[in-house]
Amino acid sequence: MLKTDYKEDVFEGNRKYKLISNQDGTTEIVDETAYTQEGDPFGANDINATNAAINRQEHVTLLTLKAAEWTGSAAPYSQTVAVDGVTAEDNPILVSALEDGADLAAQKAYNKAFGILATGTGTTADGSVTFKVYKQPTTDITVGLKGV
């Protein structure tokens, strides 16, 4: 989770600095401002975490749901798939992974299976996603999870 409660420095007037001459010929700058509230630092770790979170939202992880691996003797049927990087708090978006140039028969089979998945549900856990459907797809289907 990204930090969302950064605070600004609060002080009256202008910032105050003292210059101190060191024996090696360098000068040190010391902040002498009287703060009523000291703000939070924002550094490389913060921006790296922010950028990683933004990049993750655009990333699509592909996974294959096997027709033979749906479990349950009655609806809803379920299938749990290992997904690297997913957490229980994630809420990825299911997206089509139909290959460009697929022939008409492949498109029809894919769209039928994807339609079944899109009306089902997916539940995330740390390292896996469980899909539940009310009708079992009859073909293997590769789908994408956006935001993982």
Image (cartoon, grey):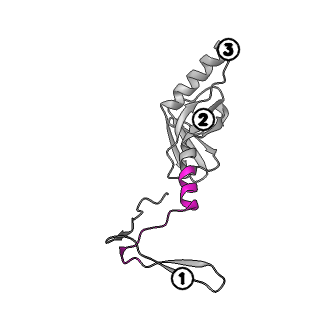
Q: Residues within 10 Å of mark 3 (few under 14, many from 20)?
A: few
The amino acid beneath tag 3 is Asp
Horizontally, residue 95 falls left or right of residue 36, namely right
Of badges 1 and 3, the one in the foreground is 1
Percent from the top left, x then y, of residue 75?
A: 50, 35
Percent from the top left, x then y, of residue 146?
A: 56, 39
Camera-side residue: 141 or 55?
A: 55
Which callout, 2 or 1, points at the residue further toward the start of the chain? 1
State if disc 3 and disc 1 touch (CB < 8 Å): no
Camera-side residue: 48 or 22?
A: 22
Separation of residues labelled 3 and 2 (CA atoms) = 20 Å
The amino acid beneath tag 1 is Ile
Q: Is residue 41 magenta?
A: yes
State if disc 2 and disc 3 touch (CB < 8 Å): no
Decide: is 57 above or below 89: above
The amino acid beneath tag 2 is Gly
- What residue appears at the point 36 percent right and 70 percent down from the top-left corner? 14
Q: Dot 3 lies on which element? A: loop
Please name the residue that numbered disc 2 is placed on: 144
